Amino acid sequence: MVLKVYAPARTAGAIGAVLMTLAETQTPFELVPIDMSSDEHKTAAYRALQPFAQIPVIVDGAFVLHESRAICRYLAAKHTPSQLVPTDPKAKARFEQGASVEFAAFHPHAYTAVIEGLAKPAKGKPTDQRVYAAAVAQLAATLAVYERILARQRFLGGEAFSLVDVFHVSFGPLLARAGCDLMTAAGPNVARWWGEVIARPSWTRWEQGVGSTEAY
Ligand SMILES: N[C@@H](CCC(=O)N[C@@H](CS)C(=O)NCC(=O)O)C(=O)O
């Protein structure tokens, strides 16, 4: 039975990392489109799969899993354990270090900047400029550290491309549209790294959206 992905047929937001991992692991899937504009993700049927009423969810046979990072780790473990998550203890520790930094020091600020600078205006709501400015400043501080890390290693989880890099494609690509193009402006090493990540075919293949079924 083909794996099902419950999400809107577009790349924006937490589905981004899942889509990139599906392509990196060459996992065929069927998209079950969720219409967030009509709050389909808040229905009882959807909450039965995702109790926090958020996108995305996967259903693999009888196995239901939410949380984009957990989904990516599951797909990587199932299909390519040695490529997207290192297995050597020290390389794995470096990977976990990068994954923790993404979750604690990148995502919260990128998410807030995107909500305030892009999602709210798109819904006709005013941006809270104080919240937006604070998020952008904190994101800039994180990316200043990334700039130093990426001066000595090719990717954020180490020398090899990994899920740590993948996790950034959920909200990183939305920052320019939210009015803060920090992924290219933060410094030459961040720009070099980010350019390499978003040029991968596993990301560019979703530029035109997601089909109802995907094979490779
Ligand atoms: N921790 C969740 C967060 C997912 C998330 O932020 N989903 C957003 C879309 S990008 C969502 O469902 N927003 C609607 C809502 O919270 O009502 C994950 O990583 O899967």
Image (tube, rainbow, N blue to C red):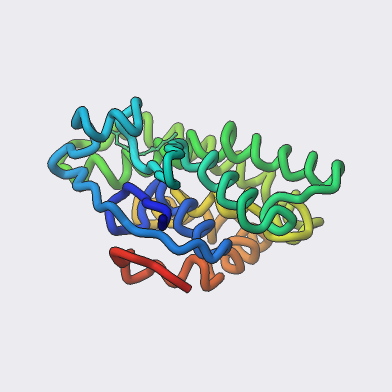
Q: Position of residue 93 (x, y in %)?
A: 79, 39
Q: Does residue 75 sit above or below 193 in this rendering?
A: above
Residue in the image at 53% along x and 41% along y:
69
User: In the figure, residue 142 lies in which quadrant?
Assistant: top right
Say which residue appears at 35% left-offset and 56% top-offset: 177
Image position of 138 (left or right of 114): right
Residue 62 x/y as whole percent: 42, 40
Q: How many marks?
A: 0
Looking at the image, which residue is at 61% across and 46% down?
143
Q: Percent position (x, y) of residue 161? A: 68, 60
Q: Nearer the viewer, residue 196 or 73?
A: 73
Residue at x-position 40% and y-position 36%: 112
The one nearer the camera, 51 or 11, is 51
Tell me the quarter of the picture where residue 29 sits: bottom left
Left or right of residue 87, residue 156 in this image:
left
In the image, taking residue 142 as reference, residue 15 lies left or right, namely left
* Residue 113 in the image, given as x and y percentages of width and height: 40, 40
Ligand 1: give its quadrant.
Answer: top left
| Front residue of this view, candidates 70 and 99 | 70
Question: Is the N terminus in the top left, top right, bottom left or bottom right quadrant?
Answer: bottom left
Q: Is residue 10 above or below residue 39?
A: below
